[in-house]
Image (cartoon, rainbow, N blue to C red):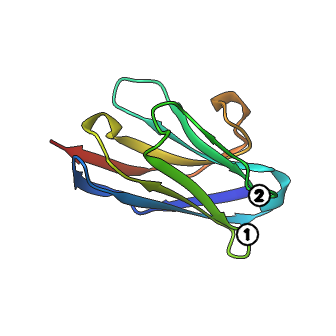
């Protein structure tokens, strides 16, 4: 099993930046892909970005393209999400995930970290 722990959320003004971190432990290489999802109040959890442990191939939701960057440090078993030009609609709980780019394919979730973007 993989255990995931996020950090780095907080309150930021629109246009600002935040970097989220995800520490993976356990059988981290049993899943080839790591990702970030988010869930806003009253909405379904949605995919944001993902990256493969191996070659570092990246995937982004349209809402994240050009503003967010996902990266990983294989040696430290860390995954990061750099979020720039934040908008109020980015406000959500952000979850680190192991296993896929779709909710039903995720094998493990972190506990989530709150990101609040104020206008």
Q: Quadrant of the C terminus?
A: top left
Task: Locate residue 36: give its quadrant.
Answer: top right
Q: Measuring 46% from the left and 59% from the top, which residue is drawn there? A: 20
Checking the image for residue 82, the label placed there is none
Q: Residues within 10 Å of mark 1 (few under 14, many from 20)?
A: some
Q: Residues within 10 Å of mark 2 (few under 14, many from 20)?
A: many
Verify CB contact (< 8 Å) between mark 2 and mark 1: yes
Which is more N-terminal, label 1 or label 2? Answer: 2
Residue 7, placed above or below residue 49: below
Q: Measuring 40% from the left and 43% from the top, which residue is drawn there? A: 93
Task: Locate residue 102: give its quadrant.
Answer: top right
Task: Locate residue 43: give its quadrant.
Answer: top left
Residue 31 placed where, x, y %?
Answer: 80, 50
Q: Nearer the viewer, residue 88 or 30?
A: 88
Residue located beneath label 1 in the image: 74
Q: For mark 2, give the secondary structure.
A: loop
Q: Measuring 67% from the left and 35% from the top, which residue is drawn there? A: 101
Q: Nearer the viewer, residue 79 or 1?
A: 79
Residue 106 placed where, x, y %?
Answer: 69, 38
Q: Quadrant of the N terminus?
A: bottom right
Distance, label 2 to label 1, CA atoms, is 7 Å
Does residue 111 appear in this view?
Answer: no
Does residue 3 appear in this view?
Answer: yes
Q: For mark 1, give the secondary structure.
A: loop
Q: Using residue 81 as the reference point, say whether residue 84 is left or right of it.
A: left
Checking the image for residue 53, the label placed there is 2
Residue 33 placed where, x, y %?
Answer: 74, 48
Residue 65, placed above or below residue 104: below
Residue 76 placed where, x, y %?
Answer: 68, 75
Q: Residue furthest front?
A: 66
Q: Residue furthest right?
A: 30
Q: Using residue 4 as the reference point, say whether residue 92 is left or right of it.
A: left
């Amino acid at each position: 099993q993989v255990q995931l722990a996020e950090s780095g959320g907080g309150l930021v003004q629109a246009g600002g930046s935040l970097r989220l971190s995800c520490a993976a432990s356990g059988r981290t290489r049993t899943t080839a892909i790591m990702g970030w999802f988010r869930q806003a109040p009253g909405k379904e959890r949605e995919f944001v970005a993902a990256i493969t442990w191996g070659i570092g191939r990246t995937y982004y939701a349209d809402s994240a393209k050009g503003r967010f960057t996902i990266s990983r440090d294989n040696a430290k078993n860390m995954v990061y999400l750099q979020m720039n030009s934040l908008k109020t609609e980015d406000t959500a709980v952000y979850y680190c995930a192991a296993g896929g780019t779709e909710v039903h394919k995720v094998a493990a979730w972190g506990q989530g970290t709150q990101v609040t973007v104020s206008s």
